[in-house]
Amino acid sequence: MELKTTVYQKESKSNITKLIKESIKDIFVSRFLAQQLAIRDIKAQYRQSYFGVVWAFITPLTTALVWVILSKSGTISVTDTGVPYPVYVFSGTLLWSIITESINAPMMNTNAARGILSKINFPKEALIVSGIYKLLLSSLMKIALLLFFLLAYGVDFSFSILLFPLVFLSIVFFGTTIGLFITPVGMLYNDVGKIISMGLGFLMYATPVVYGIPKVGIMKTVMEINPLTPLILTSRDLLVGQNSEYSIYYMGIMLLCIPLFFLGLVFYRISIPIIVERMSA
Amino acid sequence: MKKMKDNEILVKVEHLSKKFCKDLKTSLWYGIKDLCNNLLGNKKQRFLRPDEFWAVKDINFELRRGECLGLIGHNGAGKSTLLKILNGLINPDEGKVTIKGRVGALIELGAGFNPILSGRENIYNNGAVLGFTKSEINSKIEEIIDFAEIREFIDMPVQNYSSGMKVRLGFAVAAQMKPDVLIIDEVLAVGDLGFVLKCFKTIDTILPETAIIFVSHSMPMVSRICNQIILMEHGKTEFQGGDIGKAIDLYYTRFAQSESNAVFDDGSLTLEKAEIFNAIYEKNIPQLRWGENLVLYFKLKVKVPADSLEFSIIINDKEQRSVAVLQRNDESLNLNPHNTIIEFKVTHQNLQFSKGIYSLSLGIRKKATKIPVLRINDIITFQVVHPEEIWEPFLLKSKFEMINNNYKSKIV
């Protein structure tokens, strides 16, 4: 039996393809760990809470409610969205919360694991994967609620809804990719997390979440360029069975995400030792 | 399977160095720079930037299967940093570590525990972090619960466990690892004596198959299991080698207090002089050979006249445990209450302390009322010289004789 040899030194001798391979191998090796971490966090979360799953969608629901009331009372007027406005807003805020959660998940999970990161050597990729598991669970609840809304408002389902799971997964994939790049810097400076949450708060209004893209003006250009626009629009259009004008842009973003995701994985992987060094007691 | 060579080198450390930063803000900024440099391959030689220092500098060693390396040194000497590099948690700034086989680390027991969840659930969490598969844990869970001796509370949330129970459970899981290289930081200190002994039994059984790196401040433990020592100071190797006794002596001399400290003083007496009459001085430490007489001389100045006093001379070992007390003075030491100086000599014949460093404390109280007058710790530090290294405090003279009797193979 040949023993595995590990070398630790300052230079990262391995090239990027080798690092990607190692990273994928570790994801595979640590699948039980990822699953176990996800089960641990979910169990602990629900065991210490009465309302449990309600918290997953209470924020997007209240945001949506505010906009529905504003619009119904005539305080603001929104352009025609093609579907009943409550459906538009609810689907928008729920999908938006999935995006923001998936962007934040890598950093949140890595931060929560600070204690073991500085003590035990384990495949760090498991933190990302367990984050995705948790995300999938909470998102599935949101989607179930969303489907219920669609039924309640009598929106006709079309076959395009069968493509929705794929688009949903791609949203999580997109968010995780961005999260991977933010995490190393965010682990060093708390500012990053604050900037991200504030930035996303603003960005929501530059994305067709609670209102559609205006016909003219600077906002039109901004919203059309915003890479989150095609994500929200494509997924919503699939749900309500409308034709999506943004599918090309959407495909482009997803194709770009694939190499970026692996790059992010490598960046995350080689950054962890530096973060551990700076944060450990 | 047993074909593995006994002498294969499992851990090889060459010129290992690591620097740390003293200032947090600067440290974080360097962290960002390092992140960027890291992407570019990071080939350049590293020098100290402002505010940085070498936490570990130029460490070299090799460790084979069945060997145990003890890492000793005072707090902040760089031991834990070295362990973190060996465990792959942080990367070195210079040098290289080559490790063969599976590495197990007992740096923190019970990593990944969630306080809300039960002990049983946390066995799975901790096991997963340590790299076990689900089926491995399933097959070992009963053994783990028995080893930890907490079957009664295994379904209780871990937040209600005592720290000792958490350590038990953590060690029980970790003990299931079959590592080739085992890294142990001072983690066993929390458990009670029974558990610590159990841990050492486990370590003893895996030692022949494993290369162990052991960090501890408990020299008896170190001398018990290690066959190589690195004494670290300020990140550098101060001593390295197989002479455990010498290393431990060196470790203790780092702590040898040259200054005596008065713990209690009612102002009526001052100690003018205290010395060992018959000692040879080497490096300012009086030395006595084992079996020699210990002859002490004391001179005290009396400020407030008192009648009879009682003198206790206590001998402490290097870990500040008091190991012996000399018989107190009887009536033969007559003190004249009008003297302003008290001078006396105490002899203990044939000193049988084992090799090592000892210190003397002096306690004086009034004979009749037992009211303390003066207590000074560490008035004299001395060294006992003997070729044999043992960690028990006494090496008592003994004589073995064969008894010839009619029973054939009875060994006496």
Image (spheres, rainbow, N blue to C red):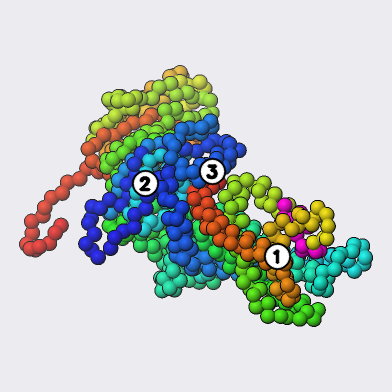
Residue displayed at 51% across by 32% down: B49
Question: Which residue is disc 2 drawn over?
Answer: B97
The image quarter in which residue B195 lies = bottom left
Nearer the observer: mark 2 or 3; the answer is 3
Q: Relative to B362, is A25 above or below?
A: below
Q: Secondary structure at mark 3?
A: helix
One can see residue B89 in this view:
yes
Could you say which is closer to the camera, residue A117 or residue B91?
B91
Residue displayed at 31% across by 56% down: B210
Q: Chain of mark 1?
A: A
Residue displayed at 44% across by 24% down: B271
Counting every numbered tag in the picture gives 3
Marks 1 and 2 share the same chain: no
Quarter of the image with the C terminus of chain B is bottom left
* Range of residues picked out in magenta: A199-212
Q: Residue B303 vs residue A92: left or right?
A: left
